[in-house]
Image (tube, grey):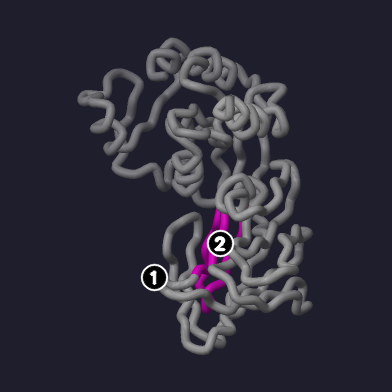
């Protein structure tokens, strides 16, 4: 990556942690070391890792103005543009302006007045080691369900392939500006996932008598939900910009990442 950028006289900014990880001390010509990427405004962010690395990369740039191009060094790499074998041609294509931009929807969580952004999902879950909890939720002001369960997932389109998928929720094309609400292990015969439209606010209530639920954003704990209290989630006006090579297709990637590997493992 560094060699390709040097050949094109393109500046590279690397946080100190990456320089240490890849033993690039001194990093050499054309590379600027930074204590943190926050405050920098590069034209493109190259993320080498899995889907988690790509999602964390967006967090480095407030306002989501910097597009991210992912090279998959992870397990699934659904959001990545190329595999490691295609890093040379992939980066050359991006630097030549040959790419497509996907604008990914984010979920904004309001937890007692504190705001959080989720790239994958907001999860309300029973306490560790605790019994099931009772949660209710409404959409656009209309009460829809109240059930005993392990929790609820409110996922973005990108996050629909993560926890939402594992709990039996539907997959949503990355081009859709939508959320999906899916119950985790509901003790009910009529619980079904529900896809919401832009502008629809989802309110989740803890209707348990005494159990305090835990609230997670992209797998990170961000607070608790006491009995009788609620949280609000809605699609954020901000969009994360994901770069893909020309011709990238959500359904082809879905097949290659989830369906074909599953079939291969059966035989």
Callout 2: SS: strand
Instruction: Give the residue at x 44% y 46%.
Output: 60
Please state which of residues 168 and 50 is positioned toward the viewer in this rendering. Answer: 168
10 Å crowding of disc 1: few (<14), some (14-19), many (20+):
few
Is residue 202 visible in the rendered image? The answer is yes
Instruction: Give the residue at x 47% y 30%.
Output: 46
Residue 1 belongs to magenta span: no
Q: Quadrant of the C terminus?
A: top right
Tell me the number on the disc at residue 122: 2
Where, by quadrant of the figure, is residue 30 drawn? top left
- Residue 75 appears at what percent x and percent y? 46, 33
Tell me the number on the disc at residue 203: none
Which of marks 2 and 1 precedes in the sequence?
A: 2
| Tags 1 and 2 touching, CB below 8 Å | no
Please state which of residues 158 and 62 is positioned toward the viewer in this rendering. Answer: 158
Q: In which quarter of the image is the N terminus?
A: top left
- Residue 3 appears at what percent x and percent y? 39, 13
**Which range of residues does the magenta coloring cover?**
106-125
Tell me the number on the disc at residue 129: 1
Residue 123 belongs to magenta span: yes
Instruction: Give the residue at x 49% y 68%.
Output: 215
């Amino acid at each position: 990556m560094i060699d390709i950028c040097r050949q094109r006289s393109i500046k590279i900014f690397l946080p100190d942690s990456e320089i240490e990880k890849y033993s690039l001390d001194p990093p050499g010509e054309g590379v600027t070391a930074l204590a943190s990427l926050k405050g920098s405004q590069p034209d493109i962010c190259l993320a080498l890792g899995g889907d988690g690395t790509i999602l964390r990369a967006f967090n480095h740039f407030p306002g989501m103005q910097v597009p991210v191009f992912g090279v998959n060094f992870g397990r699934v790499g659904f959001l990545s543009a190329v595999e490691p074998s295609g890093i040379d041609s992939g980066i050359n294509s991006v630097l030549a302006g040959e790419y497509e931009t996907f604008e990914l929807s984010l979920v904004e969580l309001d937890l007692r007045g504190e705001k959080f952004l989720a790239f994958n999902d907001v999860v309300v879950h029973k306490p560790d080691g605790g019994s099931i909890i009772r949660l209710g939720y409404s959409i656009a002001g209309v009460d829809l369900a109240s059930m005993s369960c392990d929790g609820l997932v409110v996922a973005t389109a990108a996050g629909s392939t993560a926890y939402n998928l594992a709990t039996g929720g539907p997959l949503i094309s990355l081009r859709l500006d939508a959320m999906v609400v899916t119950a985790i292990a509901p003790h009910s015969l009529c619980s079904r996932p529900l896809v919401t439209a832009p502008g629809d606010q989802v309110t989740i209530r803890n209707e348990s008598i005494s159990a305090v639920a835990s609230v997670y954003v992209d797998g990170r704990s961000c607070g608790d939900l006491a009995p009788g209290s609620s949280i609000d989630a809605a699609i954020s006006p901000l969009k994360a910009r994901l770069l893909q090579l020309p011709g990238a297709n959500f359904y082809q990637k879905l097949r290659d990442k989830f369906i074909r590997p599953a079939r291969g493992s059966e035989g």
